[in-house]
Amino acid sequence: MNDCGISKLDLKRRNRMQILKVVREQGPISRVDISAILGITRAAVTIITNEMIDQHILEEVGEEPVNPSGEVRKGRRKILLDINETYKFAVGIYVDEKEVSIGLTTLNAAALDKQLIAHEGDMTPEKLVSLLDDILEKMLQNSCLSRENLLGIGVGIMPSAYEMMGLEEGTETCPVFPALQKALEDSMNLPVYINSAVMEFAMAGLHYNEIHAKAENQVFLYWDSGSYHAIPINGNTPLLAAAAGDAFIERLCVDPDGRAMEGYPRGSVRAELSAEAVADKIRPVFSEENTPALFAALNGDLSR
């Protein structure tokens, strides 16, 4: 009889990952609340979190604040845990057809250093690796860090730079750049994550709002040569998988009255999209032939 069960080590690793995820998404948070959310015993949560504190992954950040209007609790207040943002550091890279941006951040996305490098549309995976190797070394020295302090590298590539960075065919919704992936991993000896900058900016915006602002339903839209794509959002959870496309988000950053926004960086999704602006973008292709589902849903009336 084959033993297909999960080992104690695997269970601990899974619980550890779940605890980290909860602290990352909801921290600062107490051990008691982690236990309630995950359905893991308080004893197990205490053992795992104490180990991660010893490893400097988590840290205790003080007692739970007193709620002036709440019920007075007896005994000691809960001790809150949070991610130790300086346990490791991350490197972020943005690539488009004209420039490369390289940044060094803490685990809570606080920027320590950033460099913006213009190019002539001739950036290749090999050139990017060489550029990163030189700039990153200076960034680490300026912050009194070494490569051993790095957790990994994230790369966001705009669709206009896909071909330049060696996109494999047939992977538009999940772009793959094998030459760049291998070159970065071989040179840096670190985990490397590469994706569409369009999708990553959108997801980063949603994640930021989830932490710092009240969740609201929203739809993230972008267009390319007369077509559009959407990610419907319930709260802050995408109902459909985010898809990359051949478009620049900055083209669609508009005021509520439909005018282009000033002062927003490439990829910004912070501006509002009004109904009028959406209609203006859809109108050139709105027809029973080009957009049959939308046409039928609106009975041919785009002003609805």
Image: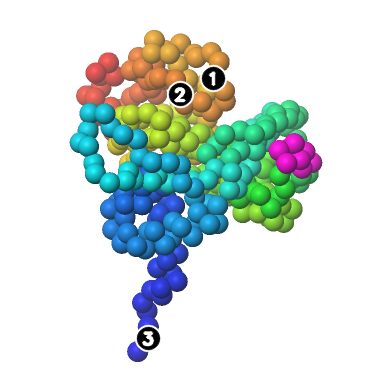
Residue 181, numbered circle = none
The secondary structure making up most of the magenta span is: helix
Q: What percent of the width, then of the height, locates residue 300? A: 25, 22
Q: Amino acid at mark 2?
A: Arg
- Which contiguous range is marked in magenta? 134-144
Which residue is denoted by mark 3 in the rendering?
2
Mark-to-mark CA distance, 2 and 1: 8 Å
Which residue is denoted by mark 2 in the rendering?
270
Judge whether residue 168 can be spotted in this image.
Answer: no
Q: What percent of the width, then of the height, locates residue 262? A: 53, 13
In the figure, residue 27 lies in which quadrant?
top left
**Quadrant of the rendering where the N terminus is positioned:** bottom left
Callout 1–callout 3 Cβ contact below 8 Å? no
Task: Tell me which numbered mark, 3 or 2, is placed earlier along the sequence.
Answer: 3
Which residue is denoted by mark 1 in the rendering?
264
Task: Tell me which numbered mark, 2 or 1, is placed earlier along the sequence.
Answer: 1
Residue nearer the viewer, 179 or 234: 234
